């Protein structure tokens, strides 16, 4: 590869267009090969986030995973690896002669090497009524491709109850199942005659359909949608045969298309995707490889194949990293044999190769048990397995994948394929797998890699998963990974206790960790690692959790180490998608004054704040503040921090209570202010949002807060705990009813401290309370069943006494670069004000 230029540090400029799974994985592979010493890396991503596992969006929609859990690389990862990320910025064109990429924000970025990883996007057929003139998609119409798509569906499903999903492939069925978990009645409309027709034959599709319908999802096949009905809101869809299916939500899951328009506009050869050679060079429109431009992922067409699975993307990323870094300049990608193993709407499905015989002498063995929801078929050609389909039972999938991948000879008795190959004990089956057998298709991890890891001394399942990435894609192979670990360890596999560790880098459950920290007087994150981590090795994933825990335990006595904090906690503001920050001054209990409002308005004018927004927590959010301007904005406001950014106590929402409301039974405003004043800024395993309502009409939404207080008849107060009304919705549990505001203050503090001392890192109260059980929490916090109430009260008092407004760091920064800008800013559209 010709080098275009060098700067003083001798590194070349590598630009990656695409921050999805393929682009980020390519960069990871490059970094693992020492690429940071060769390249200054710049990445562009159209989504305003770090890199996340798109496969897991179905779990987010279904409420099985939180958004945080699916992120592969947070924004901090880019900063830690000195990667310049333009998140939320689309590249418009490549100037190959000048070797620059031009983005829609007008910027030009030079490159010595360019990687196109633009992925694919949802295909939306041109159906009348789908779009509204001048406004894009109808408000009730959704795609299911991105995190924003998923969020939008979840929000809309809260107030709409009948959906039609267009497309009965994997994505459509996952969308249907996910919507169903939100209480939505769902009908799947599919054009072909059976579900998942790309992966299954008709008989397998029939069995899958029975399973899907048994879940309560309606299915209409051989049907074409010709119109979306409804003007202001969706009212239904019309099919080609005239039938109308009533609905108020339409989800389009009709397939994907490679994002190749940038390449096409820049003179590269594009057919079904960007055409590449075996070293992933993009070919120009004359069919000549460009030595400086490469492409990987779903946007790529290699040897006439376009892949929509993860495993081929990883293989391409490894080859490209070898080539770019010179680790193996002759590395080549020769295509992938794909085997898919999925859980579709809760039903196990596996597919590999062809689904039906293609030649007259192909053997086709089928076992179909629709009533049991089982279907198995294999296609054999010349004594080799060329295709297999399994629905409802994947017990035999490992040896079948082995036979498919290896092309190994099969028994003459074809029926034995679905019996003998799989009826052997699991341990024997694993032992017989060749080392080259791919165990984790998502990350391309072989049995040999896992075995080598175990023989290298890692003999726990979690340790192997961390070291090899096996099982960290869709997760469907975890059982097999565990079997290989057990086999490779020859029975000496360690009981995997890490699932109970508070943080991944320190091998103790929270209770033991707390005891050791107190016993040894460990007051800094580095001291904890030195004393308690294996080999004293520091683990970046553990630092935030440890910082929070130490501040909970030691209060003002903690030794602050800034690299243990997330960016929000380092600068005490909430980072936004464009790299700026939001500032939320404190308004205790939602109460403010004309003087505060005047100051906020003056600050907004002085600093040209682009957006002023009222928050759901009864505060004012000033958005678009540059990092370097934060100290002056705080100084001009001269108000305390509102804690809108950290894993801590944030706010107390109140109604007007007894002073003004004719229904008010208690002074909710005064009590809310008192609670917020006392417990402001307390670090906790996850954020805490509270509310106080003056009567059971609940105008402050107390029933869905971490702690909610409600005034009731007789001057008494109910205390509700463990509620949520965000991505997860849960009405809280009644902790107790007390007679005085002082009892509310005491029990609120005791509950918070018990939560701080026993909850897992990032575990919200809506998960923690059900895990422990409200009866147990009530016994400890209210009845003092464990005799620790006094200690809890004392501990929370110590934290209250240690409080210091973080915005005071405006006058005395904790480190020289604390308010130095780091990420390039992105121009965001101005919100119109009517």
Image: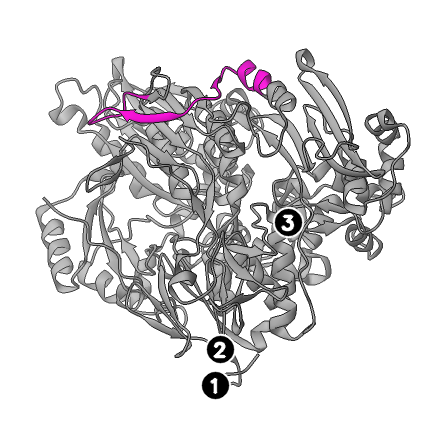
Residue 112, numbered label: 2
Q: Is residue 701 above or below residue 568?
A: above
Q: Which residue is mark 1?
A: 5
Q: Which residue is mark 3?
A: 311
Q: Quadrant of residue 580?
A: bottom left
Secondary element type, mark 3: helix
Secondary element type, mark 2: loop
From the top left corner, tell me how far across and down residue 61 is, in percent.
46, 33
Q: Check if residue 811 falls in the magenta segment.
A: no
Q: Is residue 806 left or right of residue 564?
A: left
Q: Is residue 815 above or below residue 19?
A: below
User: Magenta segment range?
Assistant: 209-237
Q: Residue at x 34, y 61 (%)?
A: 579
Please identify the residue farthest to the bottom as the structure is shown. Answer: 8
Verify CB contact (< 8 Å) between mark 2 and mark 1. yes
Q: CA distance from mark 2 to mark 3?
A: 28 Å
């Amino acid at each position: 590869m010709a080098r275009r230029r060098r700067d003083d540090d001798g590194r070349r400029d590598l630009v990656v267009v695409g921050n999805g799974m393929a682009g980020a994985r390519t960069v990871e592979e490059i970094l693992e090969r020492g690429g940071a010493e060769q390249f200054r890396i710049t990445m562009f991503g159209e989504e305003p986030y770090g890199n996340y596992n798109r496969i897991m969006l179905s779990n987010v929609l279904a409420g099985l995973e939180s958004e945080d859990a699916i992120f592969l690389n947070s924004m901090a990862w880019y900063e830690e690896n000195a990667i310049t990320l333009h998140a939320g910025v689309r590249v418009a064109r490549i100037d190959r002669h000048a070797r620059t990429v031009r983005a829609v924000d007008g910027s030009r970025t030079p490159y010595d090497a360019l990687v196109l990883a633009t992925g694919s996007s949802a295909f939306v057929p041109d159906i009348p009524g789908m779009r509204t003139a001048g406004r894009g998609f109808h408000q009730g119409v959704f795609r299911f491709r991105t995190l924003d798509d998923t969020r939008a569906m979840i929000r809309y499903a809260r107030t709409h109850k009948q959906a039609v999903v267009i497309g009965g492939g994997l994505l459509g069925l996952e969308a249907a199942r996910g919507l169903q978990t939100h209480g939505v009645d769902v009908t799947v409309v599919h054009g072909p005659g059976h579900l998942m027709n790309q992966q299954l034959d008709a008989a397998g599709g029939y069995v899958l359909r029975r399973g899907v319908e048994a879940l309560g999802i309606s299915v209409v096949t051989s049907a074409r949608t010709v119109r979306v009905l409804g003007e202001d809101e969706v009212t239904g869809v019309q099919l080609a045969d005239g039938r109308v299916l009533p609905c108020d939500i339409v989800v389009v899951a009709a397939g994907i298309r490679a994002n190749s328009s940038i390449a096409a506009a820049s003179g590269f050869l594009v057919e079904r995707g960007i055409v590449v050679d075996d070293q992933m060079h993009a070919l120009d429109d004359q069919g000549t490889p460009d030595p400086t431009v490469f492409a990987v992922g779903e946007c790529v067409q290699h040897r006439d194949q376009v892949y929509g699975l993860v495993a081929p993307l990883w293989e391409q990323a490894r080859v490209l990293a070898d080539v770019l870094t010179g680790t193996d300049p002759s590395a080549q990608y020769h295509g992938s044999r794909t085997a898919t193993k999925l859980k579709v709407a809760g039903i196990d499905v596996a597919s590999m190769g062809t689904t039906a015989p293609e030649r007259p002498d192909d053997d086709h063995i089928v076992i179909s048990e629709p009533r049991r929801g089982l279907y198995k078929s294999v296609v054999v050609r010349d004594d080799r397995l060329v295709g297999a389909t399994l629905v409802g039972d994947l017990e035999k999938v490992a040896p079948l994948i082995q036979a498919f991948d290896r092309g190994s000879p099969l028994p003459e008795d074809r029926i034995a394929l679905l019996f003998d190959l799989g009826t052997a004990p699991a341990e024997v089956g694993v032992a017989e797998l060749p080392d080259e057998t791919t165990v984790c298709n998502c990350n391309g991890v072989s049995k040999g890699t896992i075995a080598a890891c175990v023989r290298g001394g890692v003999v726990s399942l979690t340790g192997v998963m961390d070291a090899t990435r096996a099982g960290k894609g869709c997760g469907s192979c975890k059982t097999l990974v565990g079997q290989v670990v057990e086999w490779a360890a020859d029975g000496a596999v360690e009981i995997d206790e890490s699932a109970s560790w508070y943080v991944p880098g320190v091998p103790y459950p929270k209770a033991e960790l707390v005891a050791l920290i107190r016993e040894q007087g460990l007051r800094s994150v580095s001291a904890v690692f030195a004393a308690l981590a294996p080999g004293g090795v520091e683990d970046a994933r553990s630092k935030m959790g440890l910082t929070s825990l130490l501040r909970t335990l030691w209060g003002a006595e903690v030794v602050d180490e800034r690299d243990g904090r997330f960016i929000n906690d380092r600068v005490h503001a909430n980072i936004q998608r464009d790299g700026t920050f939001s500032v939320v001054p404190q308004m205790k209990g939602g109460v403010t004054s004309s003087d505060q409002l005047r100051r906020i308005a003056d600050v907004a004018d002085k600093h040209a704040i682009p957006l002023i927004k009222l928050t759901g927590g009864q505060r004012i959010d000033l958005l678009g503040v540059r990092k370097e301007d934060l100290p002056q904005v705080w100084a001009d406001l001269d108000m305390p921090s509102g804690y809108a950014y950290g894993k801590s106590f944030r706010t107390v929402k109140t109604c007007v209570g007894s002073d003004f409301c004719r229904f008010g039974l208690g002074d909710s405003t005064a009590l809310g202010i008192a609670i917020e004043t006392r417990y402001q800024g307390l670090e906790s395993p996850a954020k805490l949002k509270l509310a106080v309502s003056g009567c059971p009409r609940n105008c402050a939404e107390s029933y869905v807060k971490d702690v909610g207080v409600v005034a009731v008849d007789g001057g008494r107060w109910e205390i509700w705990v463990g509620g949520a009304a965000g991505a997860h919705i849960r009405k809280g549990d009644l902790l107790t009813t007390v007679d005085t505001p002082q009892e509310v203050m005491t029990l609120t503090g005791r509950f918070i401290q018990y939560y701080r001392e026993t909850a897992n890192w990032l575990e919200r109260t809506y998960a923690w309370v059900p895990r422990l059980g409200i009866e147990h929490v009530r016994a400890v916090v209210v009845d003092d069943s464990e005799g620790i109430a006094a200690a809890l009260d004392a501990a929370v008092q110590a934290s209250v006494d240690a409080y210091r407004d973080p915005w005071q760091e405006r006058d005395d920064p904790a480190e020289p670069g604390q308010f130095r800008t780091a990420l390039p800013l992105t121009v965001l559209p101005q919100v119109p004000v009517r």
